[in-house]
Amino acid sequence: MHIGQRLVRPRQPWPSRHALVTIPLALIVVITLADLHSPESIHLGPLLVVAPAITASFGGYLLTGLIGALAVGAQAVIAVLNGGLDDANHISQLVALAILSAFSVVVCYIRDLRTEELARVRSVSEAAQRALLRPLPDHLGDLHIASSYLAAEKEACIGGDLYAVTRTGDRARVIVGDVRGKGLAAIGEAATLLGSFQEAAHHHPTLPALAEALDRSVCRYLAEYPEADEEAQEHFITALLLEIPEHRPVARVVHCGHPPPFLIRQGHVVAMTSPRPAPPLGMSGLRPGAYDLHAFSFRPGDTLLLYTDGVVEARDRSRAFYPLEERVAQWARCGPGTLVQHVVEDLLAHTDGALGDDAALLAIRRAPGPHTGLHLSHRAHGAV
């Protein structure tokens, strides 16, 4: 289950726009009648320009042109009934109204063109972003999966956070990552890591080997930054690599500077920290060969909640961080889809819908049922 939350201003339905047309039409009628019944020294006809101006705020250029033509016609009626069209004052009012109405039509036409262009750009952007961050399957073997992505940047579907799941042999492999930075500027690095993971996950027998391969890919990508980029040496990606064998009640993980996952078992929540976390990807020069494997039991009925720091670092109005572990404990007996939905809704309420960073959530539950294999607790690399 993929749960996405993004506040989008809904398009106004046609009945509402249709009802709004009555406003400029009513103004034309009221202004015309008021002018005809006013003393000769009072001229209300120039106010007719309000009608096309209002129409341009909600209608297209054709509707604006039609209302403008009706306004000019109403001004002509006023002129005929108040002295004739040969009066210089009436002629000047007609010409001015026609020019201003035409200007409203031109402005509306340019706006409509840009709106259509923006809609096409958004459509292509959303398609590209969805192709990059593919929806995860609801089930993968005996695993039930739910996810959510909240992009901090407006109008974006994704940003610098990432996740992916793939099946290789008799095991599932998962990555959750967070590119330094946020929004669309971080998508290039996220795309590099996701592409490398989807391929390398099938060619490396162990998670440490997979982590080293991903680190090399990220380092190659970062090496291509222009030398003028002063922050090129500060770019990195925190990541968590997870492996879940199908027939063994165990999970294996490599921490690359990423927040630890939460293990939810029988209503209890435990942070599965690693005794020897590794540096983020893209910083292999700091500690070569630092990717240690950490294993723990993952039994039928257990749930793992993976997340990015955009969740735990989200702040409310008082600048308090979001208490993820405390909130998850309230919904510890929920299924993965319900759990993720509760966290997303609560997170948006905590931040009033204004996230300071991209946030991703991924819940994986092993279906209850008989499983064979060794029950493991915390064990270091080489024990499994």
Image: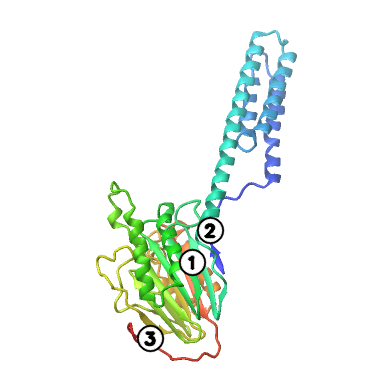
Name the side, left or right, on which 221 lies relative to 90.
left
Instruction: Using the image, tell me which numbered label, if any, was put on residue 346.
Output: 1
- The reply, left or right, for residue 70 in relation to residue 230 is right
Say what amino acid the circle numbered 1 marks. Asp
Please give the name of the residue rendered at 35% of the width and 73% of the height, measured from the top-left corner: 255
Q: Residue at x 48, y 57 (%)?
A: 158
What number is the disc on residue 384?
3
> What kind of residue is marked 2?
Ala
SS class of the residue under badge 3?
A: loop
Amino acid at pointer 3: Val
Give percent across and percent down for residue 316: 40, 61
Badge 1: residue crowd in 10 Å (few <14, some 14–19, many ≥20)? some
| Earlier sequence position, callout 3 versus callout 2 | 2
Q: Quadrant of the N terminus?
A: bottom right
Give the alpha-carbon distance from disc 1 to disc 2, as whole Å: 28 Å
Return the residue at label 2. 131
28 to 167, vertically: above or below: above
